[in-house]
Image (cartoon, rainbow, N blue to C red):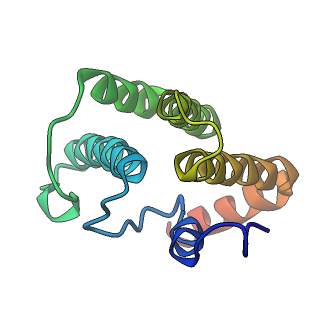
Amino acid sequence: MCQGLIPDDEIELLKRCSLSGEYALGISQPTLKKWYAFEVALRNELVKIRAGRKRIEPAKYLRQDGFVEPAVSHLAMNAIRNPSILEAERMLDLERWYVLEELAVGHYFDLDFLIIYAYKLLILERWGKIASADKLKAIGEVLQKDTAHQ
């Protein structure tokens, strides 16, 4: 909907916003750099914890390495320890939302604001899909896969 109102290169940047974990290296846009740094640090911490539990070497699954704030390690550990997968995901997405709120400080209707808004919409869309999912069907599929592996 912003087409024609903002430059094409900014539109392309917004189109590439994704929660999938595929991040372009070499991004110079400051807000995206901070977002990617947080998201990569969080995903790396989750990988390290999961790899430790499976007794495998995490190095081949890690993305660029850098400084990790203790709060990110703590968040990842708490999410992994949560017995409810759904609640663990909710914890992670709440923290993502808080990070986006921090990144929004001082931005009112500029590209940074649009990037933050795009990521918030992606998080809300994800939870909309979760809320509307057929839970009984999903449980049946999981149980069917589990019995097929036994």
Q: Say which residue appears at 75% left-offset and 54% top-offset.
A: 125
**Viewport quadrant of the N terminus:** bottom right
Is residue 83 in view? no
Horizontal and vertical percent for residue 88?
A: 54, 34
As drawn, 103 above or below 59: above
Image position of 19 (left or right of 61): right
Horizontal and vertical percent for residue 104?
A: 54, 34
As drawn, 67 above or below 131: above
Horizontal and vertical percent for residue 143?
A: 67, 59
Q: Say which residue appears at 56% left-offset and 36% top-offset.
A: 107
The answer to which of 47 and 123 lies nearer the viewer is 123
Task: Indicate the quadrant where residue 15 lies.
Answer: bottom right
Image position of 21 (left or right of 85): left
Is residue 59 in view? yes
As drawn, 59 above or below 116: below
The answer to which of 124 and 24 lies nearer the viewer is 24
The answer to which of 50 and 61 lies nearer the viewer is 61
The answer to which of 53 and 108 lies nearer the viewer is 108
Q: Say which residue appears at 41% left-offset and 52% top-offset.
A: 32
Q: Say which residue appears at 51% left-offset and 75% top-offset.
A: 9
Task: Indicate the quadrant where residue 25 lies.
Answer: bottom left
Mark count: 0
